[in-house]
Image (cartoon, helix red, strand yellow):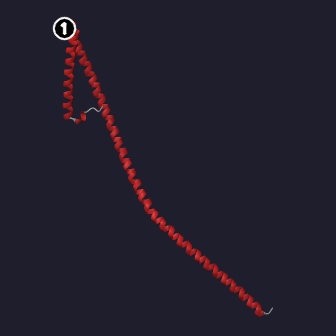
Amino acid sequence: MSTNTVIAIVVAVVVILLVILGLSFMARSARDKKRRAEADRIREEAREESARVEKREAIAAETEAKARAAAAEAEAKAAEAARLRDRAASHRDEAASSREELDSKFQHADDLDPRRKDDADAAYALAEKERAKHEDADRVEHVERVERDPQDRVVN
């Protein structure tokens, strides 16, 4: 083989290698460009989604704040209810004690009343009228007290 042929073959091989190298460089460049475009598209979608997520986070934070406020209000209401229950129990105890005293007075009056021995039904009816009259007076007194001090109400 002549040197010209060898040189032509070497040049042809170098040219083919350069063409292959150029084609691979162009292919990689095109692939990189496509990947950059895909990455940019994904970033844009992520920015849009980020705005939606931030809005959801704000709504969640607001809802949590409302929940905390509602819980605090519920605790305050529960404390108020407990206080009112205690006050109602106190009033109930006082009323029971007063009722026992009244019953004792009625019994004492019945023991002293000579009519009670003669006409038990009439004396009992009279005593019941007196008891009803005293209960009405107690109710009127309680209503007047509540009108003066609304905190004195008993919740049933």
Q: Is residue 155 above or below residue 131?
A: below
Residue at horizontal 55 percent and vertical 75 percent from the top:
33
Question: Callout 1: helix, strand or loop?
Answer: helix
Residue 55 rendering spot, x and y as whole percentages:
41, 59
- Location of residue 8 in the rendering, given as x and y in whole percent from the top left corner: 73, 90
Residue 105 placement (x, y as % from top left): 22, 15
Q: Is residue 144 left or right of residue 40?
A: left
How many dots with numbers? 1
Residue at image point 38% right, 47% down? 68
Q: Residue type at mark 1?
A: Arg
**Image height check: is 4 above or below 29?**
below
The quadrant in which residue 2 appears is bottom right
Residue under pointer 1: 115
Q: Determine the residue positioned at 24% across, 13% down.
A: 107
Query: Which residue is outermost to the right?
Result: 1
- Horizontal side of residue 38 vs 139, given as left or right: right
Which residue is pictured at 23% across the width and 9% down the height? 120
- Image-based side of 64 in relation to 149, left or right: right
Q: Is residue 117 above or below residue 28?
A: above
Task: For the C terminus, give its image quadrant.
Answer: top left
x then y, percent, for residue 48: 45, 65
Quadrant where the N terminus sits is bottom right
Pointer 1: residues within 10 angstroms few (<14), some, or many (20+)?
Answer: some
